[in-house]
Amino acid sequence: MRVFVAGATGAIGRQLVPRLVEAGHEVHGMTRSKSNEATLDELGAVPVVADALDPDQVAEAVGRAKPDVIVHQLTALAGEGMRDLKRRLAITNRLRTEGTDHLLSAGQAVGVRRFVAQSVAVYARTGGPVKSEDDPLDLTPPGRQREAAAAMLHLEEAVLGAEWTEGIVLRYGGFYGPGTGMGPGGDMHEMIRKRRFPLVGDGGGVWSFIHIADAAEATLAAVEHGTRGVYNVVDDDPAPVAEWLPALTRMLSGKKPRRVPRFVVRLAAGEFGVLMMTEARGASNAKAKRELRWSPAHPSWRQGFAAA
Ligand SMILES: NC(=O)c1ccc[n+]([C@@H]2O[C@H](COP(=O)([O-])OP(=O)(O)OC[C@H]3O[C@@H](n4cnc5c(N)ncnc54)[C@H](OP(=O)(O)O)[C@@H]3O)[C@@H](O)[C@H]2O)c1
């Protein structure tokens, strides 16, 4: 198939493109900048330079590639820790609203058979610790996360509501591994290594992780045989912060994480930061395993962190 990957140079794009090529697909990889053309070429994709926020450029790029499938992995999250975060989140929100709409319109014009898009497994902080795709999302988080949740909802509704194509939403867990914030040199990796990522309260928030290579494998499966709907792409081992953070801090620094009172974290990372550490819910991958015929090579962060 011809596959058009928007976000081909990002953390997941770089893992996904070579896998698509290896599986025999013709990949067209989109980037904003000409300087990334060589990278895309090395990954095996036909480079396409276009700005995802410009509808005419997107229509022209997709019109030229005439893909069977579009994969939407656009974000603008790259950066360091909290620095410039407000701006990065605002652009990411635009990529998830306007960017999604432009890709869908361009895809409809050329009749793409399948549209696969990135979402996040952030479920409502009520009920049991591990959620399925049928459980409600957290649509009312505090602060600027409220707009992020609305943008994510827009993306999901637009993709699932596109009746002319097979719309597939992948709700990824927290990425780790090469090229991610949790990978060596990444901002979160460095914060944990320097013990600047503390335990808050009882650390009862449950997180679901996914190795970036496993996320790419699940995306390949969705491109090839997913059907309309939502899939959680997470590992088999959702775990409370009180378990995974000490394990990872010990691995990277040889010490325990620091403990910090809620009000300090609230000042540094906002109320949402506190809630992620104390109330977040994890996700189940049962549907993705069953219907995408996919299963993670790193079933647990316990071994996956060490391997990465
Ligand atoms: N579930 C998760 O845990 C999750 C999900 C997503 C991201 N993250 C984290 O966020 C951080 C950054 O993610 P990332 O490495 O994927 O980088 P990123 O800088 O967010 O870029 C992602 C992709 O979007 C493309 N893009 C952005 N704006 C564009 C525009 N206007 N037009 C065309 N393309 C555009 C980029 O292309 P060009 O730069 O080549 O133009 C790139 O290919 C990483 O630490 C990652 O782990 C985590």
Image (cartoon, grey):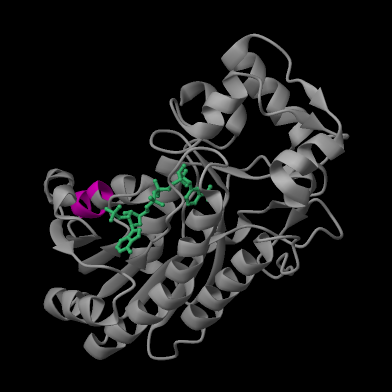
Q: Dividing the picture into quarters, in which one does residue 140 lie?
A: bottom right
Which residue corresponds to the image point at 62% horizontal and 57% vertical from the top-left?
Answer: 121
306 to the left or right of 95: right
Q: Residue at x 60, y 18 (%)?
A: 194
Query: Which stretch appears magenta?
Result: 18-23
| 92 over 85 or under it: above or below | below
Picture residue at 73% right of the left edge, 15% below the top: 256
| Residue 294 magenta-highlighted | no
Q: Is residue 239 left or right of residue 215?
A: right
Residue 208 placed where, x, y %?
64, 45
> Where residue 94 sits in the image (x, y, percent)?
46, 70
Q: Dividing the image into 4 quarters, which one contains the N terminus?
A: bottom left
The main secondary structure of the magenta stretch is helix
Q: Position of residue 115 (x, y in %)?
A: 37, 74
What is the number of callouts on the image? Answer: 0
Residue nearest the viewer, comparing 157 with 82: 82
User: Is residue 40 among what the camera can see?
Assistant: no
Q: Is residue 220 shown above or below 215? A: below
- Please give the name of the residue rendered at 69% of the width and 10% of the height, measured from the top-left corner: 255
